[in-house]
Image: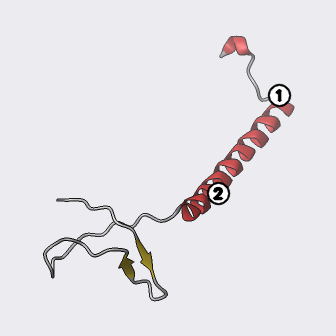
């Protein structure tokens, strides 16, 4: 399989339009992998960060609760 990197634009109907024509045999079926711009990546990263933040907050709360209720072990016993 041969890979060709080329830029394009998605229109209002969701159709992909390439910036330049491909130099391949006409009527050839191709496989397309779409890489989105960084804005979408930033949104995904923000969602992942929120999930990590929620997990970290819950872990901190559990640790704080354990410390306040004496549910801890001395370091020497670890």
Name the residue tied to disc 2: 46
Count of residue discs:
2
Q: Is residue 10 left or right of residue 48?
A: left
Foreground mark, 2 or 1, reads 2
Instruction: Pick the residue in front: 54 or 15.
Output: 15
Counting from the top left corner in percent of width and height, residue 62 is at 75, 40
* Residue 64 appears left or right of 45: right
Judged from this view, the residue extending furthest toward the left is: 25
Is residue 56 shown above or below 1? above
Farthest residue to the front: give it. 20
Image position of 52 with respect to 63: above or below: below
Residue under the point 27% across and 62% down: 4
Residue drawn at x 60%, y 54% as measured from the top left: 48
What secondary structure is marked by label 1?
loop
Between residues 65 and 57, which one lies in front from this camera angle? 57
The crowding category of the residue bearing disc 2, from other C-alpha atoms within 10 Å (few below 14, some 14 to 19, many at least 20), is few
**Quadrant (top left, top right, bottom left, bottom right) of the N terminus:** bottom left
User: Which residue is at the front of the view, 62 or 38?
Assistant: 38
Quick check: 6 left or right of 14? left
Q: Where residue 5 appears, x then y in whole percent?
A: 32, 61
Between the C-alphas of marks 2 and 1, the distance is: 36 Å
Q: Residue furthest top?
A: 76
Q: In this view, does 27 lie to the left or right of 64?
A: left
Residue beneath disc 1: 70
User: Can you name the residue that lies furthest to the bottom here?
Assistant: 13
């Amino acid at each position: 399989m041969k890979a060709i990197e080329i830029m394009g634009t998605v229109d209002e109907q969701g159709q992909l339009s390439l910036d330049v024509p491909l130099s391949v045999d006409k009527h050839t079926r191709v496989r397309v992998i779409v890489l989105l711009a960084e804005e979408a990546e930033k949104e995904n990263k923000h969602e992942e960060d929120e999930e990590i933040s929620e997990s970290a907050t819950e872990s901190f709360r559990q640790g704080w609760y354990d410390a306040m209720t004496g549910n801890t072990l001395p370091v020497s016993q670890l």
